[in-house]
Image (tube, rainbow, N blue to C red):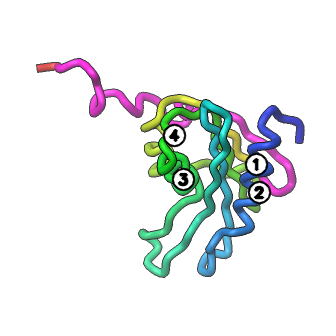
Amino acid sequence: MKTEFETLIAAALEARKRAYAPYSKFAVGAAVLSDDGEVFTGCNVENLSFGLTLCAERNALASAVATGQRKFQALAVVADSREPISPCGACRQVMAEFGDYALVAATLGGDVFESTVEELLPRARTGILDLQDSR
């Protein structure tokens, strides 16, 4: 795996080890890099009521936001899957709340997919978050 995000992927791999996934057995780790160079991690936390499950991506972002971070350079997500996983719709919307930045998804085998938040969820801020009053 040769990517500029190797350190971030390694942090996500480490976070994955702490995932709580007793139902699906599908552990996911994520790491987000703030604009000032700090790395915050998260893992998925499942719940018997599946709708209450928290994704690794949102947990990593929440960890960063809890310290006052609001601007990010990149987010990495890692899982044991055949292809690099893609964040769910809820994670994409939460990611878009903080602007456009790099996304890198990796498998345990080293396959990597790189994108951006804007590419995954185009026009996420259009309409509901327009800064101009349209009245």
Q: Position of residue 7 (x, y in %)?
A: 80, 43
> Which mark is drawn over residue 63?
3
Q: In this rendering, which labeled residue sits more in front, label 1 or label 4? A: 4
Residue 13 in the magenta stretch? The answer is no
The quadrant in which residue 104 appears is top right
Q: Select label 4 or label 2 by which is in front.
A: 4
Q: Amino acid at mark 1?
A: Ala
User: Which of the 4 image quadrants contains residue 125?
Assistant: top left
Question: In screen coordinates, is 92 left or right of 60?
Answer: left
Above or below, comparing residue 48 to residue 3 in the picture: below
Do labels 1 and 2 touch, CB within 8 Å?
yes
Give the structural element (helix, strand or loop) at label 2.
helix
Please name the amino acid that badge 4 sits on: Gln
Label 2 or label 3, whichever comes before in sequence order:
2
Q: Which residue is mark 2?
A: 13
Q: Earlier in the sequence, mark 1 or mark 3?
A: 3
Residue under label 1, please give it. 106
Please state the extent of the stretch shown in magenta in the rendering.
Answer: 106-133
Question: Disc 4 versus disc 2: distance between alpha carbons?
Answer: 22 Å
Q: Position of residue 21 (x, y in %)?
A: 62, 74
